[in-house]
Image (cartoon, rainbow, N blue to C red):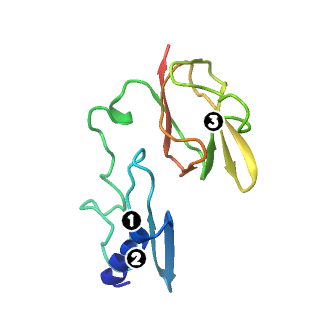
Amino acid sequence: MDIRKVKKLIELLEESDVDEIEIHEGEESVRISRHSSVTPTQTIVHVPGSNLGQTAGGKPGAGFVETAAGSPEAEAGSLIKSPMVGIFYLSPSPEDHPFVEVGQSVKKGDVLCIIEAMKIMNQIESDVSGIVQRILVENGEPVEYGQLMFVIRET
């Protein structure tokens, strides 16, 4: 896929209300997404036979982990990551109170959120006991596999 096509796709995405676009041309594909300023995003383009979208180590996406002060990786606490792709919900229904809030104490096994995947509501439980330090995803936003959702300071 020509880099000029990719640039044109980015321009089209910026000019529209679309949040994500994915194009397939034969064996080549490109996926470009725009998310809120809450979650940093990256675009990896895989073109067979080239190193576009790869770092010096040769692994796609390697080396993009943010570890600056204030980032979730730099904070003390357990990081709860999404075990699947889906839509993140903080409460069982829009009328109900959220399962957890920042500052709330949780025990191992307590439900933190729901991820809807393929019309199935999957309850995500805490792996640790502690205090919820941060909630890194907004209610109703899509989450990716392995995306950070919560920071919990163990007690």
Measuring 50% from the left and 78% from the top, which residue is drawn there? 23
Marker disc for residue 9: 2
Marker disc for residue 119: none
Marker disc for residue 44: 1
Q: Position of residue 50 (x, y in %)?
A: 32, 77
Relative to 12, residue 78 above or below = above
Measuring 31% from the left and 65% from the top, which residue is drawn there? 54
- How far separated are the C-alphas under marks 2 and 3? 33 Å
Q: Position of residue 102 (x, y in %)?
A: 51, 24
**Amino acid marked by disc 1:** Ile
Foreground mark, 1 or 2, reads 2
Marker disc for residue 90: 3
Q: Give whichever of discs 2 and 3 has the lower sequence position.
A: 2
- How far separated are the C-alphas under marks 1 and 3? 29 Å
Measuring 51% from the left and 46% from the top, which residue is drawn there? 146
Is label 2 in a helix, a strand or a loop?
A: helix
Q: Give whichever of discs 1 and 3 has the lower sequence position.
A: 1
Give the number of marks. 3
Measuring 51% from the left and 41% from the top, which residue is drawn there? 137
- How far separated are the C-alphas under marks 1 and 2? 14 Å
Tell me the quarter of the image containing the N terminus.
bottom left
